[in-house]
Image (tube, grey):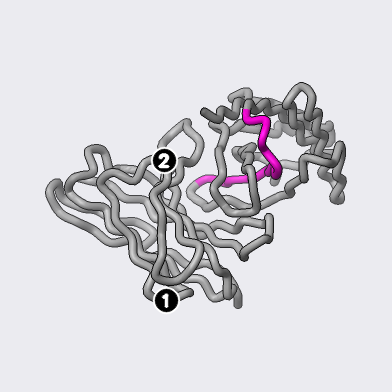
Amino acid sequence: DGGITQSPKYLFRKEGQNVTLSCEQNLNHDAMYWYRQDPGQGLRLIYYSQIVNDFQKGDIAEGYSVSREKKESFPLTVTSAQKNPTAFYLCASNNNGAASVFFGPGTRLTVL
Amino acid sequence: GEDVEQSLFLSVREGDSSVINCTYTDSSSTYLYWYKQEPGAGLQLLTYIFSNMDMKQDQRLTVLLNKKDKHLSLRIADTQTGDSAIYFCAESPDSWGKLQFGAGTQVVVTP
């Protein structure tokens, strides 16, 4: 069954802790993306990667870090430097030159 | 910078047509998208249109693009209760997934 999986679905973190969100895809897509969604707002791009071992900052990268060691995996770390980390995080992927961008089911992060 | 705007709410009766509107400012937009989001879920790609097209139809969905006015619309024919969701308009200058999203339109379908 092809698709994008994100885990966990819900995540709770204490202030001052780093936390890593998982994103895996078995679609053989080249590019992967992390978006953040806040209530009543559209999605904003955090980081993206067009190829293994390379990634670029999006519009709101401060307080986040990523890695792309494997084509199918693009984990996102929310660091303690992120001032307001409570949000819904969505991973996406597509193929080079293909307009269709597909999203995973999301991870809801709550900072206590 | 880029900006995508949508109306926040639309109420429609079951069986009627829904029209969701979107305006964008980036004249370099090449791809324009419509996504659907149900509560607590990720985004489902409904359709997209290239900027050199005026219209695209896919079953109950019709997308109209007025590039001169930078206006995009999504028409859902014979709206069903399962169409109740938030609909997002997004644009991109290229085929990479760096999308600029609107805030979403909440569509409520009433019996």
Image quadrant assignment for residue A100: bottom right
Task: Relative to A53, say whether A66 is above or below.
Answer: above
Task: Relative to B8, say whether A25 is above or below.
Answer: below
The secondary structure type at the circle numbered 2 is loop
Task: Relative to A90, say whether B31 is above or below.
Answer: above
Q: Which residue is mark 1?
A: A70
Residue nearest the viewer, comparing B68 with A64: B68
Residue occupying the point 77% across, 40% down: B51
Residue B107, percent across and down?
A: 65, 33
Q: Amino acid at mark 1?
A: Lys
Q: Which residue is mark 2?
A: A59
The answer to whether dots 1 and 2 both sit on one chain is: yes
Residue occupying the point 60% across, 38% down: B86
Task: Relative to A96, say whether B39 is above or below.
Answer: above
Magenta residue span: B26-39
Q: Which image quadrant: the C terminus of chain B?
A: top right
Q: Could you tell me if residue A57 is visible in this image?
A: yes
Image quadrant assignment for residue B61: top right
Instruction: Find out whether residue A32 is within the magenta segment.
Output: no
Along the horizontal axis of the image, is B39 left or right of B12? Answer: left
- Marks 1 and 2, the one that precedes in the sequence: 2
Residue A37, percent across and down?
A: 44, 42
Residue nearest the viewer, comparing A112 with A45: A45
Kindly check if marks 1 and 2 are in contact, taking CB atoms under 8 A apart as contact. Answer: no
Instruction: Find out whether residue B38 is within the magenta segment.
Output: yes
Q: Amino acid at mark 2?
A: Asp
Of all chains, the one bearing label 1 is A
Along the horizontal axis of the image, is A13 left or right of B7? Answer: left
Q: CA distance from mark 1 to mark 2?
A: 24 Å
* Res A23 label: none
Along the horizontal axis of the image, is A109 left or right of A94? Answer: left
